[in-house]
Amino acid sequence: LQELNTLKNLAEDPLNTLKKVAEDPWSFLRQWKADHPDSKVIGCAGVYVPEEVIHAAGMLPIVLPEGEKTAEAASSWMAMSTVCDPVRTLVGAGVQGDLSLLDGLVFVDLCPSLREASQVLGKRAAEVKWQKMLAFPAVMNRRSARPYFYQELLDFRSTVEEWAGREITVRAL
């Protein structure tokens, strides 16, 4: 019985941690930065950021959280009628200064709203030291798309290596 309780506690502890992170991701990030002062944190704006490359460079990739409070803060910086919640939240976090916790930010060029957000944040969120726009082909089944995308990923890897100050090895990936 004691072994079952121990296993239950081990299983619940990570779940409780994830619950706390989900409830207040910015507080978690503040604590993580305090615990790892020499590590870089890279915000990922867009669902297709290759987080593995960032992680392999020894940095922490963070998919930026959504929230009503930060979305409202963005309204004075962007025309909101056609902008989705994740982009509103991203701009709002920049306006409120939450992005100061990040050492860098990667955007995926998927839509006009994300492109606009990268421009707004480039002007407004000066505390973000490094930004990268990662371009994806709009249609992957074209003959030119795959070589283009492959080169884009190689360029991304090189840019991340330069920013991290270390080589990304195949083993690290």
Image: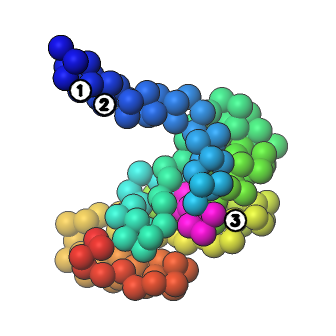
Q: Is residue 89 left or right of residue 137?
A: right
**Mark closest to the chain's N terminus, 3 or 1:** 1
Residue 15: give x, y in percent of width and height. 38, 29
In the image, what residue type sits under mark 3?
Val
Front residue of 148 and 6: 6
Q: Residues within 10 Å of mark 2 (few under 14, many from 20)?
A: few
Residue 130: give x, y in percent of width and height. 63, 72
Is 121 placed above or below 93 here? below
Residue drawn where x is 60% and y is 33% of the image = 24
Q: CA distance from mark 3 to mark 1?
A: 42 Å
Which of the numbered marks, if any, corresponds to residue 122? none
Q: Which residue is mark 2?
A: 10
Q: Which residues are magenta?
A: 37-43
Q: Circle 2 sits in a helix, a strand or a loop, which is it? A: helix
Residue 162: give x, y in percent of width and height. 51, 85
Front residue of 67 and 79: 67
For residue 135, say whether it is visible: no
Front: mark 3 or 1: 1
Q: Which residue is mark 1?
A: 7
Front residue of 86 and 32: 32
Is 31 placed above or below 104 here? above
**Mark closest to the chain's N terminus, 2 or 3:** 2
Q: Is residue 29 left or right of residue 3?
A: right
